[in-house]
Amino acid sequence: MLIKGVSLIQGGITVKGRDILIEGKRIEKIGRDLPCSRSDEILDGRGMLAVPGLINSHTHLAMTLFRGYADDMALMPWLTEKIWPLEAKLTSEDIRWGVKLGCLELIRFGITCYNDMYYYMDETARTTKEMGLRAFLSGVVFDSKPQFKAEAESFIKAWKDDDLIHPAVGPHAIYTCSAETLRWAADLAEKNNVVLHTHLSETEGEVQASMKDHGLSPVDYLDSLGLLSPRLVAAHCVHLSDKDISLLASRGVNVAHCPISNLKLAAGIAPVEKLLSAGVNVCLGTDGASTNNNLDLYEEMKVASVVQKNACSKSDALKASMAWKMATESGYKALGLDLGLREGALADLALINLRRPWFTPEASLISHLVYSMPGEVDTTIINGKVLMKGGVIAGEDEILVKAQERFEKLTA
Amino acid sequence: MLIKGVSLIQGGITVKGRDILIEGKRIEKIGRDLPCSRSDEILDGRGMLAVPGLINSHTHLAMTLFRGYADDMALMPWLTEKIWPLEAKLTSEDIRWGVKLGCLELIRFGITCYNDMYYYMDETARTTKEMGLRAFLSGVVFDSKPQFKAEAESFIKAWKDDDLIHPAVGPHAIYTCSAETLRWAADLAEKNNVVLHTHLSETEGEVQASMKDHGLSPVDYLDSLGLLSPRLVAAHCVHLSDKDISLLASRGVNVAHCPISNLKLAAGIAPVEKLLSAGVNVCLGTDGASTNNNLDLYEEMKVASVVQKNACSKSDALKASMAWKMATESGYKALGLDLGLREGALADLALINLRRPWFTPEASLISHLVYSMPGEVDTTIINGKVLMKGGVIAGEDEILVKAQERFEKLTA
């Protein structure tokens, strides 16, 4: 595939009129006037900006099926009265259409890989692969469902050599998993050399309970069990002491910052500037569409930045370039992905239409990507395959209809 | 014009398959299977949601030309080193293309009316009318440019009977206008029965200076000069005492809440829940694209809601329905506009494509409008005239090119 005449951002500078040659799954060459063989599919990139794929580093994709089902509620009534009763009725067919719906949305926002924790991971893996996206998938593990541990082990075996699907281990949180379960999860991830994914220090209540039960902050507690390492992606990390921040930094933990979900559930604002100053790798996630209520990392970048500026009383905090890095490079680092808009990298990228008012004047495109553009991209390519072109995704209408049917059946 | 088979939200409920008949500037009829005359233009509304026009209740539209020119800076260096030197060079030709660029963006976000304060109001008025939008325009007034007072008076005379353009009076703020100027502005607005538009209590520094200079909060000070009334639209109102809030409520003042600009400049979070509880009419604005950096009220609704929930530690604060009201009905009330999706109202509306993942499942469309959809609409109609259809605006490319040229000339 050859993308002709596209704009790129290289070292913060916009360069125009470049060609991108994709051979198989990888970017073969980036340059001017590249020759194309007769068999190459040609994409006209004029008036477009090519950007590397974004990474949604914390989500629960099948929950896209619950979007808007119950908003503006406190966390516990939302869970006990609305979400848990629905989840108790979920079948793998619901998961299938929920994941497809979520994949449509990720494609539309130019997100080429997501880091997920939920139920029915085999179905999620099959469906994601069918849709053509890249994913890190953890079947959620907690003590009240002991069978989830065995399922997590067999899921890793089944998928560990897949091209797009990366199995991972997902102990839910310190308040739903025993010390034994948490240690088991760390060992399993270590033994199989896969990502470990958990929720951490999301609410003040979680910190208080941990201090009461263990005499340790949630971060200290996880460290005492050996979970803090560069293979951990810890979602949220809202309530942290300075000591917690140092510990996360020294252990090389990756933090998945989810500002919109945290704000919407009134959970607080993560100390991102402090985490970054300490050298922590902070990436960006939307959390599930049931608490966000979308999967748009463009919106998430902007909210992360402006909310952090205000929280720090510093209008130069969390600059656009850092927000962009959190959604791209920091995600690649957290998950060990060979991505980026460079020769040799896996071909996950999006083309964005620059002929829109929010890109004018063309002063700083990174600023416009983060602060100005609504999230929709024009074209999304994953693993060298075009999944959306000119805003059209094959089969989208059927997915919307089927997802609606599943939702109506679940809530009938 | 007849819009066929569209969905509508009536009393919070979605109804489908309705027709909207527009005669001249007004909505003539809404119903099922309306007959059309041979001369009616037909718009296919199937798969679309019709919503009434949104009101951007505080902006500086020509500043869209400065989008992304200088981000991530503290307020004073941003003004003194970047914005003021640029503004000193502005010509009416720059205003023309800056306003056109802003109008493109408003149209794309389904915003049919904006409340503006800036320079060169005659050019702004002519250009806005040419673009077909509705606007309330105040030439900014402050003491260092005494000639602006005379210009404000002649601007009102010139435009007061216009169909789309509503002249207004815009004293900049208490820290740039003397007591005499503020009283003059209130009198001028009263005498001409027009809107009064100012910045109020935007920063902590403004409050401290007012206490020092006048022994009064900015709100008390404006009240002492007779400016607080239902004709006032007061932008920002971030730093308010409980007494200030009561006073704004008892005087019937309209507040234009601009949460993204406030966060991005680290100015604070307005006490919107308290204002609403006190009965204040709170509408929604983006501020200029130079501090936001776009004019997207969909994004503004979501940020207003989630940020307020967190600030109040209440996940049921500022619900989606209230955010939607702030962007619509509260704006109509503040500006005295006869708008809304109902028979007899002026025909300002947008059609939104529901065949998108962020509208699935179709649980609550108000929730999806506020929390899920990226801001772009499909079709925008103002004063009975179609300004965008299927995402296409006539003449857009020329405006983007000309705005870019003006920006390059200004910053050369």
Image (cartoon, coloured by chain):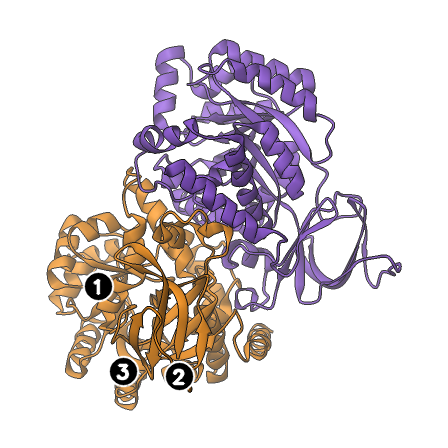
Chain colours: A purple, B orange
Q: CA distance from mark 2 to mark 3?
A: 23 Å
Establish if A293 lies above or below B54: above
Q: Where is the N terminus of chain A found, in terms of image quarters?
A: bottom right
**At 39% from the left edge and 83% from the top edge, which residue is drawn?**
B129
Q: Which comes sooner in the sequence, label 2 or label 1?
A: 2
Q: Position of residue A63 (x, y in %)?
A: 47, 37
- The amino acid marked with disc number 2 is Lys
Q: Position of residue B6 (x, y in %)?
A: 40, 65
- The amino acid marked with disc number 1 is Asn
Q: Are marks 1 and 3 in contact (CB under 8 Å)?
A: no
- The amino acid marked with disc number 3 is Lys
For disc 3, the marked residue is B149
Q: How many residues crowd around disc 1 within 10 Å: few (fewer than 14), some, or many (20 or more)?
A: many
Q: CA distance from mark 2 to mark 1?
A: 25 Å
Establish if B52 lies above or below A246: below
Q: Which mark is residue B129?
A: 2
Q: Are marks 2 and 3 in contact (CB under 8 Å)?
A: no
Establish if A27 lies above or below A119: below
Q: CA distance from mark 1 to mark 3?
A: 23 Å
Q: Nearer the viewer, residue A198 or A13?
A: A198
